[in-house]
Amino acid sequence: MKEIILKKLLRDHRGINNAIKRKNLLQYCKVYDPALTDRELRRIVKEIPLICTCERGYFIAQKAWEVEHSIEYLKKKIFPLWENIRNLEESYSDILSSPQKELFR
């Protein structure tokens, strides 16, 4: 499936303006694997480092600014998760710093 996805993007989705929405890529891939799920597609896409992502979908970058845009897009998704992690660590700081924390694993 990796090869199918990469060939599709290299052929039809070069540049950010030609990005393909995930649901459309999934629909295309289901021709080859009707059982493919959205979760599996996302996992496969993550395994292909050449693929960029943005609010428009997946694409193969043609210019440096497109790669930078993709990186910034991903950073915006990551930062809220770091905030969640910090909040959890603060909320459970007493448990996490306790010598008995092994009891909670």
Image (cartoon, rainbow, N blue to C red):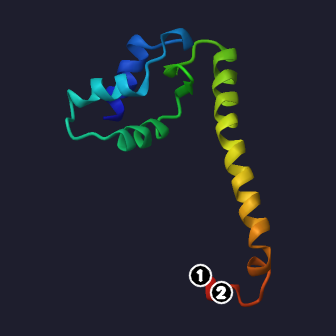
Q: Dot 2: what SS?
A: helix
What distance separates the C-alpha of mark 2 from that of mark 1? 5 Å
> In the figure, residue 78 lies in which quadrant?
top right
- The residue that mark 1 highlights is 105
Q: Position of residue 9 (x, y in %)?
A: 41, 19
Do callouts 2 and 1 mark residues in contact (Cβ within 8 Å)?
A: yes
Front one among 8 and 89: 89
Front one among 33 and 97: 97
* Above or below for 83 versus 8: below
Amino acid type, mark 1: Arg
Is disc 2 surrounded by few (<14), some (14 to 19) or many (20+) residues within 10 Å? Answer: few
Amino acid type, mark 2: Glu
Q: Considering the image in quadrants, where does the N terminus appear?
A: top left
Along the horizontal axis of the image, is 61 left or right of 44?
A: right
Front one among 30 and 44: 30
Along the horizontal axis of the image, is 92 left or right of 73?
A: right
Q: Position of residue 5 (x, y in %)?
A: 36, 27
Along the horizontal axis of the image, is 28 left or right of 85?
A: left
Q: Residue visible at 72% across and 90% down?
A: 100
Q: Residue visible at 48% across and 10% down?
A: 18
Q: Considering the image in quadrants, where does the C terminus appear?
A: bottom right
Q: Position of residue 85 (x, y in %)?
A: 71, 58
Along the horizontal axis of the image, is 46 left or right of 71?
A: left
- The residue that mark 2 highlights is 102
Q: Residue visible at 65% across and 29% down?
A: 73
* Above or below for 70 versus 75: above
